[in-house]
């Protein structure tokens, strides 16, 4: 193995793969990168056995080959190299790195011990927009469960439909849904863990189309310069279509910023979580109120186009804030059915495919 690579390219490559490696593991091999010089590319792989990332970049390959070297040490060194041109060579049982007058010699371990990535399942693949996947992750992953006992709800459901795919997250108290277009006949109904989604966000530029596919235990995302493979979460995901209300009794439109600011102001008197906030609709006004035995009371008002009977409902302020913050546009639509039923929050733009459901909470 022998190659010449640009320093910035090397740094960027290692940065994308480092977080997939395992720092403290019973398997020392997982703290290493697998480097492969092949044709006109340097390919770097990292894995913790749950997530496996392979990234590549152009390099001048003098001799093809593989090397397995400590991931953190190589990444740290790459940041300190003095010259833009980096020379890397496998020599006996050491990886030699030269940049300017600086030289390193790092020990290597047998590359055949490194866990191999499974082949991308081409037969079950379809194409999605990288930008839309990024949006889908950002608009849903906030609603995943943080409870270890709710294992299946700790990830985001990817469910393919005819020409589209739903990304869905829920913790049982709220739900976030974003629908993206897809091109191809492959089918998935899988739960992707949060770590894989975090890795995917680092790899996506937002400009590329990516291929996606799944096997019984793994999901794959592939672009021209990288592949991500992740083990799936097991367990039953609830039927999210049943909790989206089809009918409602009240619909209001609010300026997004004014509404968010008001919720944050009134919830500031409450410490910890939940932060109960009571919303009351009156003629022309939405009143927001919260109480804390220790810190007192807060009240705020927003003008709203409403002329019906007085209507009150309580929410955890954090759930409202997180559901509204990811909405694009200046206004937000809220649809109520009853004080005890789930509330639908959505963008004003009818072409925007984001939906959020928030369950109410009782407030004395």
Image (spheres, grey):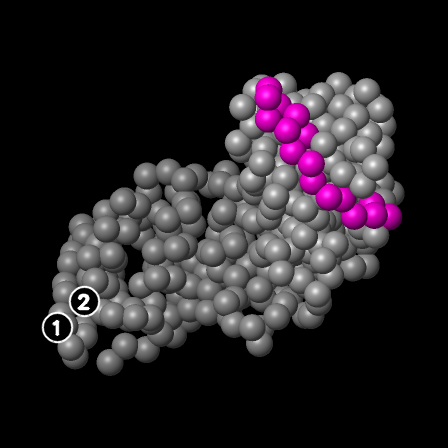
Q: Nearer the viewer, residue 186 or 279?
A: 186
Does the magenta stretch mainly form a helix, a strand or a loop? strand
Range of magenta residues: 97-112
Q: What percent of the width, then of the height, locates residue 44?
A: 72, 37
Residue 269, disc: 2
Which is nearer the eye, 343 or 43?
43
Question: Measuring 63% from the left and 68% from the top, which residue is drawn there?
Answer: 152
Quarter of the image for residue 66 reads top right
Can residue 12 be seen here? The reply is: no
Instruction: Report whether 65 appears left or right of 102.
Output: right
Is residue 287 within the magenta segment? Answer: no
| Residue topped by disc 1 | 296
The residue carrying pointer 2 sits among few (fewer than 14), some (14 to 19) or many (20 or more) residues within 10 Å by Cα, namely some
Q: Is the N terminus in the top left, top right, bottom left or bottom right quadrant?
A: top right
Residue 358 falls in image quadrant = bottom left
At horizontal 18% and vertical 75% (from top left) the residue drawn is 292
Q: Would residue 235 be seen by someone viewing this image from the given angle?
A: yes
Residue 98 is covered by the magenta coloring: yes
Indicate the secondary structure of the residue bearing disc 2: loop
| x and y, in percent, of residue 153 in the image | 58, 66
Badge 1 element: strand
Q: Is residue 270 above or below residue 48?
A: below
- Residue 305 lies left or right of residue 202; in this view the side is left
């Amino acid at each position: 193995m022998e190659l010449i690579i640009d320093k910035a390219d090397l740094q960027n490559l290692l940065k994308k793969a480092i977080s997939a490696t395992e720092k403290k593991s019973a398997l020392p091999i997982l703290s290493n990168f697998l480097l492969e010089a092949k044709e006109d590319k340097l390919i770097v792989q990292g894995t913790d056995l749950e997530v496996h990332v392979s990234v590549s970049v152009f390099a001048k390959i003098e001799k093809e080959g593989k090397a397995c070297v400590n991931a953190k040490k190589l990444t740290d060194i790459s940041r300190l190299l003095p010259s833009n041109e980096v020379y890397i060579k496998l020599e006996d049982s050491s990886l030699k790195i030269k940049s300017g007058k600086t030289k390193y010699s790092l020990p290597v371990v047998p590359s055949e011990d490194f866990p191999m990535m499974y082949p991308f399942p081409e037969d079950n693949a379809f194409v999605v927009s990288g930008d839309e996947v990024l949006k889908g992750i950002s608009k849903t992953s906030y609603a995943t469960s943080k409870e270890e006992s709710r294992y299946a709800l700790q990830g985001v459901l990817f469910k393919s439909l005819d020409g589209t795919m739903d990304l869905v997250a829920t913790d049982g108290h709220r739900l976030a849904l974003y629908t993206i277009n897809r091109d191809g006949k492959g089918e998935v109904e899988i739960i992707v863990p949060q770590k894989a989604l975090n890795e995917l966000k680092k790899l996506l530029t937002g400009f590329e189309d990516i291929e996606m596919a799944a096997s019984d235990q793994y999901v794959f995302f592939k672009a021209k310069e990288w592949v991500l493979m992740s083990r799936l979460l097991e367990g039953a995901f609830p039927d999210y279509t049943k909790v989206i209300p089809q009918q409602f009794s009240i619909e209001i439109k609010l300026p997004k910023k004014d509404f968010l600011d008001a919720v944050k102001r009134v919830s500031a008197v409450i410490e910890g979580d939940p932060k109960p906030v009571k919303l009351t609709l009156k003629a022309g006004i939405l009143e927001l109120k919260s109480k804390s035995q220790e810190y007192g009371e807060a009240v705020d008002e927003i003008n709203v186009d409403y002329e019906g009977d007085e209507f009150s409902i309580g929410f955890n302020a954090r759930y409202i804030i997180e559901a509204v913050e990811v909405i694009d546009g200046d206004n937000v639509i809220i649809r109520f059915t009853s004080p005890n039923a789930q509330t639908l929050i959505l963008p004003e733009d009818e072409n925007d495919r984001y939906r959020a459901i928030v369950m109410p909470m009782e407030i004395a």
